[in-house]
Structures are given as C-alpha cells and as structure tokens.
Amino acid sequence: MITYLYETIPASCCEEPKHYEIQQAISDPPLSKHPETGEAIRRVVLGGFGAHEPAKPADSGCGCGPSGCC
C-alpha cells in the first residue's frame, strides 16, 4: 500500500482545501470522493525537479564564505 496525498476541491475561491493522506494500492485508480465524507477530492502530485537556475561559478561572490552574501 502507498500513502497518497489528496485535497478537497473548494466550492469557492475563498475556501481553503483540506488535505488527507489515504493509503491505496498502486494499481487503484485515483479517488474522486473521500471514502468517509463523500467530499470531492483530487490526488496531489508531489516531487519532481521543476525549474531551476544553473549553478553559479565559484568566483561569482554568491554563496556562503568570506566573500559570499550569507
């Protein structure tokens, strides 16, 4: 069993989603309703690298150290 993160689908823009951890088999399809409350939910996809900036050269003055900006 794997624990997935789910969140409610807010009915309005002012409502904050509630988060749930639900255990499922990896072969189970994503849930669309909370099994106990019946609220509309969606699986939250976590992880990945996303966008990132290339590393700065060591002599650029950025970073921790005597000439860094910490």
Image: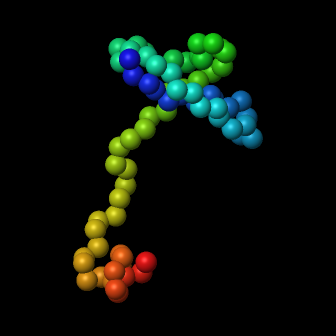
Q: Quadrant of residue 29?
A: top left
Residue placed furthest toward the left: 58
Q: Can you say whether 27 is above or below 12 in the image?
A: above
In depth, the one of 29 and 63 nearer the eye is: 63
Horizontal relation, residue 54 to residue 12: left or right: left
In the displayed structure image, the side of residue 22 where residue 57 appears, left or right: left
Q: Position of residue 20 (x, y in %)?
A: 57, 27
**Residue at the bottom extreme of this rendering:** 67
For residue 63, what is the image quadrant?
Answer: bottom left
**Foreground pick, 42 / 66:** 66
State whether residue 4 is above or below residue 34: below
Indicate the position of residue 32 as horizontal and vertical percent values: 55, 18
Tally of numbered discs: 0
Q: At 46% from the left edge and 19% from the top edge, which residue is drawn?
A: 23
The type of colouring in the image is rainbow
At a point 30% along the width and 82% down the height, the residue shown is: 60
Residue depicted at 59% across the width and 16% down the height: 33
Q: Quadrant of the C terminus?
A: bottom left
Using the image, determine if residue 50 lies above or below residue 6.
Answer: below
Residue 10's quadrant in the figure? Answer: top right
Check the image and report above or below for 58 versus 8: below
* Residue 66 x, y percent position in the rendering: 34, 86
